[in-house]
Structure formats: C-alpha cells, structure tokens
C-alpha cells in the first residue's frame, strides 16, 4: 500500500461526517423558514426539525464539554504554578527569618558595653580556600578592623585572627591551622601545646598520667581565653608513655555565616 493510498483511505471517514453536518444544517434552516413562512408545512416537517435540533444540541454539548475540560486543565495548571510559587516564597521567608534572628543576636552581643565588636559576614570558607583562610565582607573603608584582631563565633568560640585588611574585605587565618597553640585543658587547667590539624581540629600529646576525659573544655589563654574546642578522642597504648588527645571546635566552621571581630 502506497503512502498516498493510505492517506486517502485514512480520510474516507471524513466524508460521511461532512455530509451529516450539511444535512443537519439544511434541516435546521428549512425548519426555521417553514415555521416563519409556511406554518402549515412546518407541522409536517416538525419531526425532522426536532431531530435536527436535538442533533445540533448534541453537537453543541459535545464541543462545550471539551471546552469546559480544557478550561479546567488550564485552571489546574495555574493553581499548581501559584502553589509552587507560594511554597518557594515560604522557604525563602523561613531562611531569611532564621538569618535575621542570628544577625540580631550577634548585633545584641556587639552592643554590650563590656565588649565592642564588629559583626561581619563570612564570604569564603576553608572548603573553598585550602590554606585555612576565610574572607569577611568588611574592610578598612567600612570598619575599624586591623591585623591581629580576634575573630570569634557566638562570643565564645575562637576561630582565628585577622591577617590582612583591604578596602572592603578582610582575610582571617584560622587557629586550627597553627602549628603550635598554648592551651589549658579541663577543670584543672592542664597546660599543653596543641597542634592545628585544619578544619577546626587539633591534637595534643600529654603524659599518660595526665587526667583528661572526653568532653573536657580546651581554651586558648593567649587568645583572650576563648574556647578552642572540646576533647573528643583519647588515644593510649601500653607501650607508649604518652597519650594523644584529639579535640575539635563545637561548631561546623564550614557552615558559619556570621562572626564577631574583637579588637586587641
């Protein structure tokens, strides 16, 4: 079967439909004219007129059904889009509210008379810069930050010190990259020297007899006595007279958005 013959055959169904539509149209027109100009003949042709009217009404109802269905689909799509937009707006609003609460808390801390700090936003974190340097969104043009100032989170956890101040941003070196940091451990304030392992992690080597337990607080006296971290792992062996203490910052430094900068 050729393509032409197939198309010709596939269109054969259209001819009866066209003929039927023409006949129904003629019947409707004839019925109207008969009722208007030939009332007597109209009574004879009325059955045909009723058939035509019913058939025409059926076609109209048929097309009206599909129009209503199409309108309903369009309305559903519109409602779905509006629902998605509302959900997206709600997510954005919750995120902004959380960030505003955190910023307000930091601003309240910076307004304390006993401490004067500058609140700054973190732009780049150590997972972007492997050297352990973060960038803040303030500089010499819009703050009084200077090299050596302490960078702290939540007024408690020491993160680092200011390395370099430019016009509108500041670079901060994390203390967890320092090779040697003087610290005090636990309630007895055991003195030790910690080594930064990067990413907020530290290591200490102590004699095996030194009493240290998991959860002990580690502070940095030379950095204003701020918290450096909490003891997490204690490694001991029978053959080694020393023990290795691993501790880390009580926060995820890769997720910090706001910090305070204190002058020294």
Image (cartoon, grey):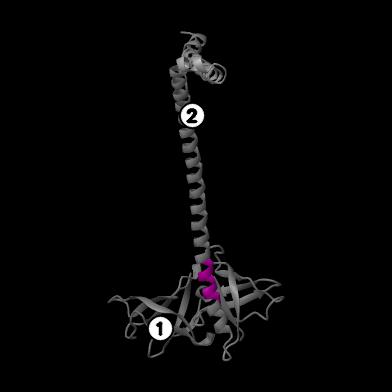
Please give the residue where the numbered disc 2 appears in the rendered image. Answer: 60
Main secondary-structure element of the magenta-colored stretch: helix
The answer to whether 8 is drawn above or below residue 78 in the figure is: above
Comparing 50 with 55, the one in front is 50
Task: Using the rendered image of the protein, determine whether residue 151 is visible from the camera's viewpoint.
Answer: no
Of the two numbered discs 1 and 2 in the rendering, the one whose residue sits closer to the viewer? 2
Q: Mark 1 — residue?
A: 217
Examine the rendering and report whether any part of residue 240 can be seen: yes
Query: At numbered mark 1, what does the secondary structure look like: helix, strand or loop?
Result: strand
Q: Position of residue 211 (x, y in %)?
A: 33, 86
Asked if the stretch drawn in magenta spans residue 97, the answer is yes
- Between 95 and 106, which is closer to the camera in this rendering? 95
Q: Is residue 212 above or below residue 101?
A: below
- Residue numbers of the magenta segment: 95-103
For label 2, the SS is: helix
Q: CA distance from mark 1 to mark 2?
A: 83 Å
In the rendered view, does 21 fall on the left or right side of 245? right
Residue 185, by quadrant, is bottom left
Q: Position of residue 133 (x, y in %)?
A: 57, 69
Where is the C terminus found, in terms of image quarters?
bottom right
Q: Residue furthest left?
A: 238
In the image, is residue 124 part of the stretch drawn in magenta? no
């Amino acid at each position: 079967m050729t393509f032409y013959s197939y198309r010709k055959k596939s269109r054969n169904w259209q001819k009866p439909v066209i003929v039927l539509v023409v006949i129904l149209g003629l019947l409707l027109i004839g019925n109207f004219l008969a009722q208007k100009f030939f009332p007597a003949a109209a009574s004879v042709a009325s059955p045909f007129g009723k058939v035509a009217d019913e058939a025409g009404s059926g076609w109209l109802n048929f097309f009206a059904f599909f129009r209503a269905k199409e309108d309903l689909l369009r309305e559903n799509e519109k409602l779905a889009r509006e629902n998605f937009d509302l959900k997206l707006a709600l997510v954005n609003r919750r995120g902004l509210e959380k960030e505003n609460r955190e910023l307000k808390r930091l601003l309240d801390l910076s307004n304390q008379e006993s401490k004067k700090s500058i609140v700054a936003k973190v732009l780049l974190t150590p997972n972007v810069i492997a050297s352990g340097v973060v960038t803040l969104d303030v500089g010499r043009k819009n703050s009084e930050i200077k090299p050596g100032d302490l960078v702290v989170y939540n007024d408690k956890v020491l993160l680092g010190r200011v390395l370099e101040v430019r016009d509108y941003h500041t670079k901060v070196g994390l203390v967890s990259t320092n090779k040697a940091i003087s610290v005090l451990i636990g309630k007895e304030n055991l003195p030790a020297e910690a080594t930064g392992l990067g990413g907020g992690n530290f290591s200490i080597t102590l004699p095996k007899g030194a009493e240290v337990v998991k959860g002990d607080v580690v502070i940095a006296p030379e950095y204003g006595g701020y918290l450096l971290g909490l003891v997490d792992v204690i490694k001991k062996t029978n053959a080694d007279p020393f023990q290795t203490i691993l501790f880390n910052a009580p926060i995820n430094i890769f997720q910090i958005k706001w910090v305070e900068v204190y002058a020294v």
